Image (tube, rainbow, N blue to C red):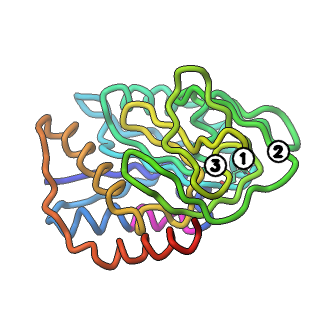
Amino acid sequence: MKLTIGYLYGDLMNIYGDTGNIIALKKRAQWRGIEVTVKNISIGDRIPTSDVGTQIDLYFFGGGQDQAQKSVARDLAVSSKGKVIKQDVERGVPLLAICGGYQLLGEFYKPHHGQKLPGIELFPAYTVAGDKRMIGNIVIESMFGKLVGFENHSGKTFLKKGSLPAGMVICGFGNNGKDKTEGCIYKNAIGCYMHGSLLPKNPKLTDWLLKKALEVKYGKDINLEPLDDTLEFQAQITAIKKFS
Ligand code: GLN
């Protein structure tokens, strides 16, 4: 089987080790004999299309500083990327967005300085920069069990009525440090504030993204061959014990 990962603005939106998520997705696919291509999709690029939509089977969108987010928001607004990404998510293509990437997939992100940055309105949520940065380790309860990561954001994200959080905060700040929600999930798209990078220590989430991508691409149920996740779970359990 083959898989193409669309790395959104990987040259601009890749802080706090977020490229580690691409490595984790790639490795866990390759360990199962799945051929992986990573396509960087950045400013001025078009998302390659196919007869079913696009050639992208899974999107990843990392975090970034306000400055990079301004250029990326502009590109998303003037290009067809936002519409194409939403169409792919509607047909079930999975997506993982972290922090700055997550913020730009909502309705808008209002940074401390300058104009409100328009999002692509994938997630029914909006973000406003707060007056203090929310920094530290984070543990949440989710549909994948406990997930552990690291957060560093001033943006406070508020979910609109009817939207679903990716999980509930056990320790850390999450979306806004107030309502105990963390992230947002819509169909197979997940946005969250969990850097770390997130996926290496949370193999269940990694495999869920891979499974969904392959099931949409090949149009059938896919059961991934189990891997020896002893080390991954040791890292996850150690971190959860230490932080929560
Ligand atoms: N610039 C955004 C904020 O500070 C996102 C930061 C990030 O991606 N870590 O909230």
Could you say which disc has been placed on residue 174 in the image?
Answer: 3
Mark 3 CB in 8 Å range of ligand 1?
Answer: no
* Label 1–label 3 contact, CB within 8 A: yes
Task: Examine the rendering and report whether any part of residue 213 can be seen.
Answer: yes
Kindly identify the residue that appears in the image at 40 percent across and 49 percent down.
Answer: 6
Kindly identify the residue that appears in the image at 50 percent across and 68 percent down.
Answer: 240
- Mark nearer the N terminus (2 vs 3): 2
Could you say which disc has been placed on residue 130 in the image?
Answer: 2
Q: Local crowd at mark 2 within 10 Å, few (<14), some, or many (≥20)?
A: some
The spot of residue 197 in percent (x, y) is 51, 66
Judged from the image, the secondary structure of the residue bearing numbered disc 1 is loop
Residue matched to label 1: 177
Q: Local crowd at mark 1 within 10 Å, few (<14), some, or many (≥20)?
A: some
Frontmost residue, 13 versus 11: 13
- Is 164 situated left or right of 47 in this image? right
The spot of residue 174 in percent (x, y) is 63, 49
- Secondary structure that dominates the magenta span: helix
Q: CA distance from mark 2 to mark 3?
A: 13 Å
Task: Identify residue type, mark 2.
Answer: Gly
* Label 1–label 2 contact, CB within 8 A: yes
Query: Quadrant of the image for the C terminus?
Result: bottom right
Q: CA distance from mark 1 to mark 3?
A: 6 Å
